[in-house]
Image: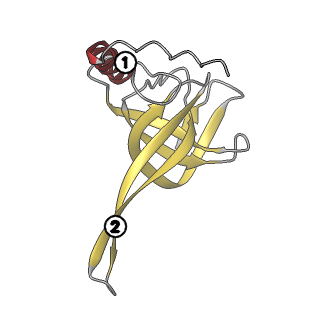
Amino acid sequence: MAIDSGRKGELSTRGHIRVGTVVSDRSKKTVVVESDTLDYFPKYRRSARSKSRLHAHNPDAMGAKLGDIVEAAECRKISKTKAWIVTRIITKAKTTVLQARGGKSLDVEAERLRKAAVKRAELPPPTPAKEAKPE
């Protein structure tokens, strides 16, 4: 399958296809897709949950945004970290998700700051420092 990359013609896809959520869309034509996996270890009869993050090319025609569930296919190496391309958007994000510098969404960060301000208001006023006695 060939997809118009918006750069120098089409990119042919090959190999694996992953489904995941876009967790970062800060770069111009790159998104970070995070996919969850559940691995079973028969020796221990336990399952382990893990995540993998991959950088995928986001063509202008796709326009995947933060919070979208997308399908990414493997393609030739585009840059040092990009070897995947977004092929389709499965589900659009229900609301606009804003992201702060630390990776937390802005509403979570605002709630944390509000709670800190309330705690500071509940504290008693600081007592004045005692003066040192001259010797």
> Residue 25, relative to residue 2: is it above or below?
above
Please provide percent x and percent y for residue 82. Answer: 64, 42
Tell me which residue sits at (41%, 48%) in the image: 35
Q: Is residue 132 left or right of residue 103?
A: right
Please provide percent x and percent y for residue 63. Answer: 48, 22
Picture quadrant where residue 114 is located: top left
> Residue 14, relative to residue 82: is it above or below?
below
Marks 2 & 1, CB-CB < 8 Å contact: no
Picture quadrant where residue 34 is located: top left
Please provide percent x and percent y for residue 73. Answer: 50, 46
Residue underneath mark 2: 48
First in residue order: circle 2 vs circle 1 = 2
The quadrant the C terminus occupies is top right
Please state which of residues 23 and 80 is positioned toward the viewer in this rendering.
Answer: 23
Identity of the amino acid at label 1? Leu
In the current view of this chain or complex, which residue is farthest to the front? 135
Q: Is residue 34 left or right of residue 44?
A: right
Numbered badge on residue 83:
none
Picture quadrant where residue 3 is located: top right
Q: Mark 2 or mark 1, which is nearer to you?
A: 1
In the current view of this chain or complex, which residue is farthest to the bottom? 43
Q: CA distance from mark 2 to mark 1?
A: 34 Å
Please state which of residues 91 and 110 is positioned toward the viewer in this rendering.
Answer: 110
Badge 1: residue crowd in 10 Å (few <14, some 14–19, many ≥20): few
> Residue 74, relative to residue 66: is it above or below?
below
Residue underneath mark 1: 113
Please provide percent x and percent y for residue 2. Answer: 56, 39
Tell me which residue sits at (39%, 24%) in the image: 105
Identity of the amino acid at label 2? Ala
Disc 2 element: strand
